[in-house]
Image: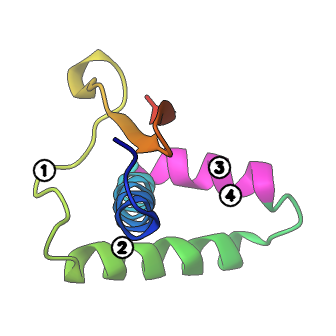
Amino acid sequence: MEPDRKSVGWMETLAKDDYRRLMLQLPEGSLKSLMREHMPKASDAQVDAVIEHIKSEVAEDPYALLQPIEPGDAGASLSVHSACLYGRRQPLAAN
């Protein structure tokens, strides 16, 4: 049985929201590294401003994890997102 387009749209929306939330909750050092990689010309002040904005978004997010995500084995976790798209199972992201 194939899911209807409305159901697939909701699954994709939820997966994207979960991935965004996970990315925003990365440790500050990891966020800075990602920003430097994707915005190499950004000043330190710009990067710091984005970090502060991200922190405020996470603080207001009722679905955000209460504990910080720690780098390394101490904070290791497995996060798998998948969706059934038009009768085929396709992975969306795996960490």
For badge 2, the amino acid type reads: Lys
Q: Where is residue 65 in the image (x, y as percent from the top left)?
A: 16, 56
Marks 1 and 4, the one that precedes in the sequence: 4
Give SS at disc 4. Answer: helix
For disc 4, the neighbor class at 10 Å (few under 14, some 14 to 19, many from 20) is some
Q: Are marks 2 and 3 in contact (CB under 8 Å)?
A: no
In the rendered image, residue 64, in percent from the top left (x then y), is placed at: 20, 64
Amino acid at dot 1: Gln
> In the picture provided, is 64 more to the left or to the right than 13?
left
- According to the picture, the residue beneath numbered tag 4 turns out to be 35
Residue at 39% x, 54% y: name it. 15
Q: In this view, does 94 lie above or below 81?
A: above
In the image, 15: left or right of 93? Answer: left
In terms of image quadrants, where is residue 14?
Answer: bottom left
| Name of the residue lying farthest toward the right | 41
Rendered image: mark on residue 67 = 1
Q: Say which residue appears at 81% left-offset and 70% top-offset.
A: 42
Tag 3: Cα neighbours inside 10 Å, few (<14), some, or many (≥20)? few
Q: Quadrant of the C terminus?
A: top left
Q: In this view, does 26 lie above or below 13?
A: above
Q: Mark 3 points at which residue?
A: 34
Magenta part of the protein: which range?
Answer: 27-38
How far apart marks 2 and 3 lie (CA) works out to: 15 Å
Mark 4 in CB contact with mark 3 (< 8 angstroms): yes
Name the N-terminal-most of marks 2 and 3: 3
The mark that comes first in sequence, 1 or 3, is: 3
The circle drawn on residue 28 is none
Amino acid type of the residue that numbered disc 3 sits on in the rendered structure: Leu
Q: Compute the Cα span from label 4 to label 3.
A: 4 Å
Determine crowd level at label 1: few under 14, some 14-19, many 20+ residues with C-alpha closer than 10 A. Answer: few
Residue placed most toward the observer, 11 or 36:
11
Residue 89 is situated, as x and y percent measured from the top left of the image, at 45, 31
